[in-house]
Image (spheres, rainbow, N blue to C red):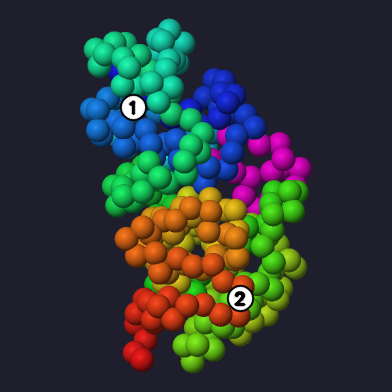
């Protein structure tokens, strides 16, 4: 059998059309990687290249084409053979894999968000290792950045403005001020965002803060996974992936904890109104920041 992570409904000649962003397409890829490991099947290289007209029309900083983010580091099937297998072999969805003999010539298709992180909830170390392995080396520099004694913010704007999903900039400001007040430290603030400087001005004018980007969505995601403290955007799977990979203390806006990521230590992930958080989270945050009581 072969395994293929189908990242978009529409794929043609090495490109996807109208596809989702990086946070969403990593779910089928991750499930396919775990299945390949479990069943010893060969992977067909995913189609990462994405053509998004909306990103161009909105003049977003990251057009999210994803054409140069990943390399075929595991010798996955690609090129002409990939297209022949996908054209000629019978394809079955991932939930039907146990109903077919292992010896059959089939392509098992992994697609969609499914149950978010639930199928891979305990595989974060392996998934991160595979993600780093396949990322183009020029986008790995954020992994060595020093995030000690700092707070990282992931502020999703871009297409979230279309559906009115944006988390208030002033909520982020309240949380930063709360953390600084509780710790008694003027902690450095790093801002990762697809918004413009005007939209982010309440945070950019904050003392000891700066925008940070490492050149691509995957570079920023891996950098965010190294955060000491992470403040995420409601509804953003990108924020969720950073937390899943990094296991740092994370704060969500009220109603923003869509899926529990730390089932072993749930006190590390909380929702907050921006004016308070639980004492056990505060203690864990101090430990992460290496601040003595």
- The reply to whether residue 274 is visible in this rendering is yes
> Mark number for residue 159?
none
Lateral position of residue 181 relative to residue 60, left or right: left
**Position in image of residue 68 (x %, y %):** 49, 40
- Name the image quarter holding residue 86: top left
Compared to 273, does 181 lie above or below?
below
Who's the residue at 24% across and 33% down the image?
38
In percent of width and height, residue 164 lies at: 74, 53
* Residue closest to the far top: 88
Magenta segment: does it hold 64?
yes
Name the image quarter holding the N terminus. Answer: top left
Mark 1 or mark 2: which is in front?
2
- Please state, as top left, top right, bottom left or bottom right, where the C terminus lies in the image: bottom left
For marks 1 and 2, the one nearer the N-term is 1
| In-front residue for pair 7/171 | 171
Along the horizontal axis of the image, is 127 left or right of 275? left
Q: Which residues are magenta?
A: 50-66
Residue highlighted by disc 1: 43
Nearer-the-camera pick, 274 or 16: 274
Separation of residues labelled 1 and 2 (CA atoms): 44 Å
Residue that carries the numbered disc 2 in the rendered image: 274
Kindly identify the residue that appears in the image at 32 percent across and 11 percent down.
Answer: 105
């Amino acid at each position: 059998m072969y395994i293929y992570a189908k990242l978009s409904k529409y794929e043609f000649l090495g490109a996807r059309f109208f596809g989702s962003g990086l946070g969403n397409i990593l779910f089928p890829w991750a499930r396919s990687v775990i299945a390949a490991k479990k069943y010893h099947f060969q992977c067909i290289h995913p189609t990462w290249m994405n053509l998004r007209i909306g990103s161009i029309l909105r003049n977003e900083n990251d057009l999210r084409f994803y054409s140069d983010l990943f390399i075929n580091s595991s010798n996955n099937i690609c090129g002409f053979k990939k297209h022949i297998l996908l054209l000629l072999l019978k394809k079955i969805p991932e939930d039907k894999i146990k109903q077919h003999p292992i010896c059959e010539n089939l392509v098992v298709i992994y697609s969609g968000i499914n149950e978010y992180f639930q199928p891979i909830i305990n595989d974060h170390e392996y998934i991160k290792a595979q993600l780093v392995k396949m990322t183009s080396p020029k986008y790995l520099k954020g992994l060595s950045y020093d995030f000690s004694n700092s707070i990282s913010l992931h502020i999703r704007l871009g297409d979230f403005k279309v559906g009115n999903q944006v988390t208030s900039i002033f909520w982020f400001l309240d949380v930063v001020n709360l953390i600084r007040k509780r710790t008694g430290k003027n902690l450095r603030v790093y801002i990762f965002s697809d918004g413009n400087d005007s939209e982010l001005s309440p945070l950019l004018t904050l003392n000891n803060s700066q925008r940070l980007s490492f050149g691509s969505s995957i570079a920023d995601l891996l950098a965010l996974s190294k955060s000491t403290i992470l403040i995420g955007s409601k509804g953003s799977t990108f924020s969720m992936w950073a937390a899943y990979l990094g296991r740092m203390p994370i704060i969500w806006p009220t109603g923003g904890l869509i899926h529990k990521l730390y089932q072993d230590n749930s006190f590390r992930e909380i929702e907050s109104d921006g004016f308070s958080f639980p004492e056990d989270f505060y203690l864990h945050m101090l430990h992460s920041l290496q601040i003595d009581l």
